Image (cartoon, rainbow, N blue to C red):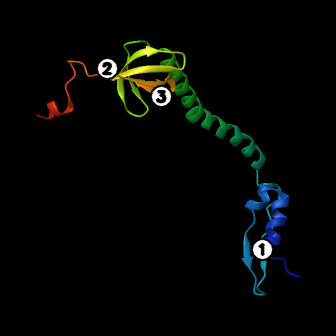
Amino acid sequence: MTPTAIDSLVFYAARGANALLAFQPTMTPGGGASHAAPAAGGGPGGGLMNFIMLPAIFLFVWFFMLRPMRQQQKDQESLQKGLRKGDRVVTNGGMIGTVHEVFEKEIVIELADKVRVRFLRDSVTKKYETQTADAKPADAEKK
Protein backbone atom coordinates (compact mmCIF):
# COMPACT_ATOMS: atom_id res chain seq x y z
CA MET A 1 0.00 0.00 0.00
CA THR A 2 1.43 3.41 -0.97
CA PRO A 3 1.23 6.29 1.51
CA THR A 4 -1.14 9.08 0.61
CA ALA A 5 -0.46 12.77 1.13
CA ILE A 6 -2.65 12.79 4.24
CA ASP A 7 -0.78 9.84 5.74
CA SER A 8 2.50 11.65 5.10
CA LEU A 9 1.18 14.84 6.65
CA VAL A 10 0.02 12.99 9.78
CA PHE A 11 3.41 11.27 10.00
CA TYR A 12 5.27 14.59 9.81
CA ALA A 13 2.85 16.31 12.20
CA ALA A 14 3.64 13.66 14.78
CA ARG A 15 7.36 14.36 14.34
CA GLY A 16 7.08 18.12 14.98
CA ALA A 17 7.03 21.49 13.26
CA ASN A 18 10.49 21.17 11.67
CA ALA A 19 9.39 17.98 9.96
CA LEU A 20 6.28 19.75 8.64
CA LEU A 21 8.44 22.42 7.05
CA ALA A 22 10.43 19.72 5.31
CA PHE A 23 7.28 18.06 3.90
CA GLN A 24 7.45 18.38 0.11
CA PRO A 25 5.02 16.05 -1.62
CA THR A 26 5.85 14.98 -5.15
CA MET A 27 3.83 12.91 -7.56
CA THR A 28 5.19 9.52 -8.57
CA PRO A 29 4.39 7.81 -11.86
CA GLY A 30 2.21 5.31 -9.97
CA GLY A 31 -0.21 8.08 -8.93
CA GLY A 32 0.70 8.05 -5.24
CA ALA A 33 2.35 10.86 -3.38
CA SER A 34 5.84 10.41 -2.09
CA HIS A 35 7.72 12.79 0.14
CA ALA A 36 11.23 14.00 0.58
CA ALA A 37 12.95 12.99 3.79
CA PRO A 38 13.64 15.80 6.26
CA ALA A 39 17.19 16.98 6.69
CA ALA A 40 18.90 15.37 9.66
CA GLY A 41 19.13 17.77 12.59
CA GLY A 42 17.12 20.56 10.94
CA GLY A 43 20.17 22.41 9.61
CA PRO A 44 23.04 24.10 11.41
CA GLY A 45 21.94 26.33 14.29
CA GLY A 46 18.22 25.68 13.76
CA GLY A 47 17.46 25.19 17.43
CA LEU A 48 19.49 28.24 18.43
CA MET A 49 17.67 30.39 15.88
CA ASN A 50 14.27 29.33 17.26
CA PHE A 51 15.54 30.03 20.77
CA ILE A 52 16.53 33.58 19.79
CA MET A 53 13.57 34.44 17.54
CA LEU A 54 10.77 33.67 20.00
CA PRO A 55 11.88 36.23 22.63
CA ALA A 56 12.69 38.72 19.86
CA ILE A 57 9.15 38.47 18.47
CA PHE A 58 7.69 38.83 21.97
CA LEU A 59 9.79 41.96 22.64
CA PHE A 60 8.77 43.44 19.29
CA VAL A 61 5.06 42.91 20.02
CA TRP A 62 5.39 44.27 23.55
CA PHE A 63 7.42 47.34 22.55
CA PHE A 64 5.34 48.40 19.55
CA MET A 65 1.83 47.25 20.55
CA LEU A 66 1.24 46.45 24.22
CA ARG A 67 3.25 49.26 25.82
CA PRO A 68 1.63 52.10 23.81
CA MET A 69 -1.84 50.65 24.43
CA ARG A 70 -1.23 50.58 28.20
CA GLN A 71 0.09 54.13 28.15
CA GLN A 72 -2.97 55.29 26.21
CA GLN A 73 -5.27 53.54 28.73
CA LYS A 74 -3.53 55.24 31.66
CA ASP A 75 -3.82 58.64 29.97
CA GLN A 76 -7.53 58.07 29.30
CA GLU A 77 -8.19 56.99 32.90
CA SER A 78 -6.36 60.02 34.31
CA LEU A 79 -8.35 62.31 31.99
CA GLN A 80 -11.64 60.81 33.12
CA LYS A 81 -10.72 60.96 36.81
CA GLY A 82 -9.51 64.55 36.49
CA LEU A 83 -12.71 66.02 35.03
CA ARG A 84 -13.82 69.20 36.77
CA LYS A 85 -16.75 71.58 36.46
CA GLY A 86 -16.19 73.99 33.56
CA ASP A 87 -13.99 71.66 31.44
CA ARG A 88 -14.84 71.56 27.73
CA VAL A 89 -14.97 67.90 26.63
CA VAL A 90 -15.75 65.69 23.63
CA THR A 91 -17.74 62.49 24.10
CA ASN A 92 -17.21 59.31 22.12
CA GLY A 93 -20.35 60.23 20.16
CA GLY A 94 -18.71 63.48 19.06
CA MET A 95 -20.75 65.83 21.26
CA ILE A 96 -18.90 68.88 22.55
CA GLY A 97 -19.98 70.46 25.79
CA THR A 98 -19.02 71.89 29.14
CA VAL A 99 -18.94 69.79 32.30
CA HIS A 100 -21.70 71.10 34.58
CA GLU A 101 -21.70 68.51 37.40
CA VAL A 102 -19.39 65.66 38.32
CA PHE A 103 -20.47 62.50 40.12
CA GLU A 104 -18.62 59.29 40.93
CA LYS A 105 -19.43 57.43 37.70
CA GLU A 106 -21.40 60.03 35.78
CA ILE A 107 -21.08 63.62 34.64
CA VAL A 108 -23.59 66.17 33.44
CA ILE A 109 -22.53 67.99 30.29
CA GLU A 110 -24.15 71.20 29.14
CA LEU A 111 -24.37 70.96 25.34
CA ALA A 112 -26.14 74.27 24.75
CA ASP A 113 -27.66 76.97 26.90
CA LYS A 114 -29.76 75.11 29.53
CA VAL A 115 -29.46 71.79 27.64
CA ARG A 116 -27.85 69.33 30.03
CA VAL A 117 -27.28 65.65 29.37
CA ARG A 118 -26.03 62.98 31.77
CA PHE A 119 -23.14 60.81 30.50
CA LEU A 120 -20.96 58.11 31.96
CA ARG A 121 -17.43 59.29 32.69
CA ASP A 122 -16.13 56.57 30.35
CA SER A 123 -17.84 58.25 27.40
CA VAL A 124 -15.51 61.28 27.55
CA THR A 125 -12.71 60.79 25.06
CA LYS A 126 -10.75 64.04 25.34
CA LYS A 127 -10.79 67.62 26.47
CA TYR A 128 -11.83 70.08 23.79
CA GLU A 129 -9.41 72.90 23.13
CA THR A 130 -10.74 75.67 20.92
CA GLN A 131 -8.50 77.55 18.53
CA THR A 132 -6.84 80.57 20.08
CA ALA A 133 -6.96 84.00 18.50
CA ASP A 134 -3.30 83.63 17.42
CA ALA A 135 -3.97 80.50 15.37
CA LYS A 136 -5.37 81.17 11.93
CA PRO A 137 -7.82 78.77 10.31
CA ALA A 138 -6.50 76.79 7.33
CA ASP A 139 -8.91 78.60 4.94
CA ALA A 140 -7.57 82.04 5.91
CA GLU A 141 -3.98 81.00 5.11
CA LYS A 142 -4.88 80.04 1.53
CA LYS A 143 -6.15 83.54 0.67
- Residue 31 appears at what percent x and percent y? 76, 85
Q: For the residues marked 3 and 2, what is the alpha-carbon distance in whole angstroms?
A: 21 Å
| Residue at the disc numbered 2 | 114
Q: Mark 1: few, some, or many residues within 10 Å (few <14, many ≥20)?
A: some
Residue sitting at the far right = 1
- Which is more foreground, mark 3 or mark 2? 2
* Marks 3, 1: nearer the viewer: 3
Q: Where, quadrant-wise, is the C terminus in this rendering?
A: top left
Q: Name the residue under label 3.
A: 123
Quadrant containing the N terminus in the rendered view: bottom right
Residue 125: horizontal and vertical position, in percent?
45, 27
Which residue appears at 41% of the width and 34% of the height?
Answer: 93
The residue beneath circle 1 is: 5
N-terminal of the two: label 3 or label 1? 1
Residue 26 falls left or right of residue 59:
right
Residue 95 is situated, as x and y percent measured from the top left of the image, at 36, 30
User: Which one is nearer the viewer's eye here, 109 or 44?
Assistant: 109
Sequence order check, earlier mark of 3 and 2: 2
Measured along the vertical axis of the image, is residue 94 above or below residue 12?
A: above
Q: Is mark 2 on a helix, strand or loop?
A: loop
What residue is rendered at 84% in x and 65% in y? 11
**In the image, is residue 87 above or below residue 16?**
above
Residue that appears at 43% across and 20% down: 108
Name the kind of residue labelled 3 in the image. Ser
Residue placed most toward the observer, 15 or 112: 112
Q: Bin the neighbour count of mark 3 within 10 Å (Cα to Cα): few under 14, some 14-19, many 20 and up.
A: some
Res 7 quadrant in image? bottom right
Marked residue nearer the N-terminal end (2 or 1):
1
Name the kind of residue labelled 2 in the image.
Answer: Lys
The residue shown at (20%, 18%) is 133
User: Element type at marker 1?
Assistant: helix
Q: Position of residue 82 (x, y in %)?
A: 48, 14
